[in-house]
Image (tube, grey):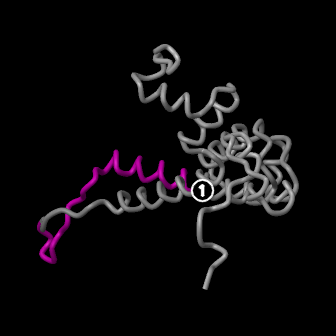
């Protein structure tokens, strides 16, 4: 009873190549899995859902598009996912503002109108849910700090294992071959 959604989530071929984890034997189909490649910021504006975003969500959306365009891994199909990513960021930031304004807890009033304790601000739960969605969607595009570091390492030409050793051994200043 295997499901097509079981196992590790597929990552874009271009991201796997940048990270140095691409293996042709594990990839089925063409490199053009996501449809038409997005090659300019103008193409990012072209998606209909963009118009439904708030000003703050549009800034997040365009920021991520600017980050992914140079990697040449963005396709038209991905844009709707980036809209969802931006909407979740908008929710997260709105909840954060509400928590800063009203606190993590609010007063609970009893039937007689007197204070009957405190309850957690609903924005706390909503913020956690939004953050979970941000992380899940961001991983699809290599937006997590780990993926970003791997991409930088591959671009710099340094072996990832060497960099991991360097980070473990007293940060960036230590080089494994200095022993």
Please report the residue visible at 65 percent of the width from the left and 36 percent of the height from the top.
151
Please report the residue visible at 80 percent of the width from the left and 63 percent of the height from the top.
28
- Whether 107 is among the magenta residues is yes
In the rendered view, tell whether residue 118 sits above or below residue 102: below
Q: Which residues are the magenta region? A: 87-114
- 148 or 134, which is in the foreground? 148
Indicate the quadrant where residue 79 lies.
bottom right
Furthest residue in direction front, as rendered: 179
The N terminus lies in quadrant: bottom right
In the rendered view, tell whether residue 137 sits above or below residue 148: below
Q: Which residue is mark 1?
A: 137
Please report the residue visible at 68 percent of the width from the left and 25 percent of the height from the top.
156
Give the x, y percent position of residue 153: 63, 30
Indicate the quadrant where residue 20 lies.
top right
Give the x, y percent position of residue 44: 79, 48
In the rendered view, tell whether residue 40 sits above or below residue 31: above
In the rendered structure, the answer to whether residue 73 lies left or right of residue 172 reads right
For mark 1, give the secondary structure.
helix
Indicate the quadrant where residue 159 lies.
top right
- Whether 108 is among the magenta residues is yes
């Amino acid at each position: 009873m295997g499901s097509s959604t079981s196992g590790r989530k597929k990552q874009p071929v271009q991201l796997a190549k940048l990270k140095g984890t691409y293996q042709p034997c594990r990839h089925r189909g063409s490199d053009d899995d996501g449809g038409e490649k997005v090659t300019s910021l103008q193409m990012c504006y072209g998606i209909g859902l963009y118009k439904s975003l708030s000003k703050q969500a549009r800034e997040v959306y365009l920021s991520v598009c600017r980050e992914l365009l140079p990697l040449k891994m963005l396709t038209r199909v991905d844009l709707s996912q980036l809209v969802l990513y931006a909407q979740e960021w908008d929710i997260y930031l709105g909840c954060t503002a509400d928590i800063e304004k009203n606190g993590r807890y609010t007063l609970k009033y009893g039937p007689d109108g007197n204070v009957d304790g405190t309850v957690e601000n609903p924005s706390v739960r909503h913020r956690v849910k939004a953050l979970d969605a941000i992380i899940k969607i961001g991983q699809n595009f290599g937006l997590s700090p780990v993926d970003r570091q791997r991409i930088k390492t591959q671009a710099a030409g340094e072996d990832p294992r060497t960099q991991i050793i360097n980070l473990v051994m007293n940060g960036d200043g230590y080089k494994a071959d200095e022993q």
